Amino acid sequence: MDRRKFLQGAVGTLGAGMLGLPTIALADDNRFWLRDRKLSIYRPASGERQNVTFFKDGRYSQDGYRRLCWLFRDVVDGNAVIAMNISLFNLLFAQQQYLRDIGRSNPLLVLHSGYRTRRHNNTLEGAAKNSRHLVGDAADFHFRQATLEEVLALARRFRVGGIGTYSTFVHNDIGRYREWRG
């Protein structure tokens, strides 16, 4: 898949055989990308739960984007906020919407980590010194109503950025494509 096309709003076709998940074609279906884009997020560290529409009527919503940037802030280091990469929100939307489209009634995105300050990142054992979290390109998360194996399979099918697998969450970022286990 051409990563650049995805980042501009198109996604490759998700195929069958992905842990038994049904087939859904996204790349050639402009309706997928023209629909309103909403993320349903729960942030355990802050107790926040929000449904945020960041793309509506064919346009990005500045209010929705700002709300998402706030949700993805560093809640450990003084609620520091950064302008997050909109492509990350599009990637997470595509994964969450796919789960909705196959019948998962409420695949809530449980956000463990979004943006991290360098000070916070330096306190984490094993965290990469050049982590994509530092520039607003990464999220650590899982979806309710989806196994980690299903989330990992979705991330692999999109083939965008880094994919890290951990015991309770998956890491996705908008850097170069690579995989690791933590």
Image: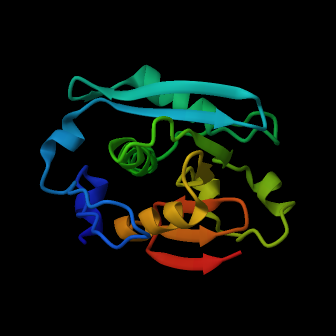
Horizontal and vertical percent position of residue 39 = 47, 35
Residue 18 placed where, x, y %?
A: 39, 70
Q: Which of the 4 image quadrants contains residue 27? A: bottom left
Q: Is residue 181 above or below residue 49?
A: below
Above/below status of 41 relative to 95: above
Near-viewer residue (114 or 130): 114
62 vs 149: above or below: above
State the residue in front, 83 or 177. Answer: 177
Q: Position of residue 59 (x, y in %)?
A: 25, 28
Left/right of residue 37 with respect to residue 82 in the rendered view: left
Report the side of 43 relative to 180 (left or right).
right
Where residue 95 appears, x then y in whole percent? 41, 51
Q: Residue at x 46, y 60 (%)?
A: 174
Q: Nearer the viewer, residue 146 or 12?
A: 146
Q: Relative to 8, say whether 51 is above or below.
A: above
Residue 63 position by quadrant: top left
**The C terminus sits in image quarter:** bottom right
Q: Residue at x 35, y 48 (%)?
A: 102
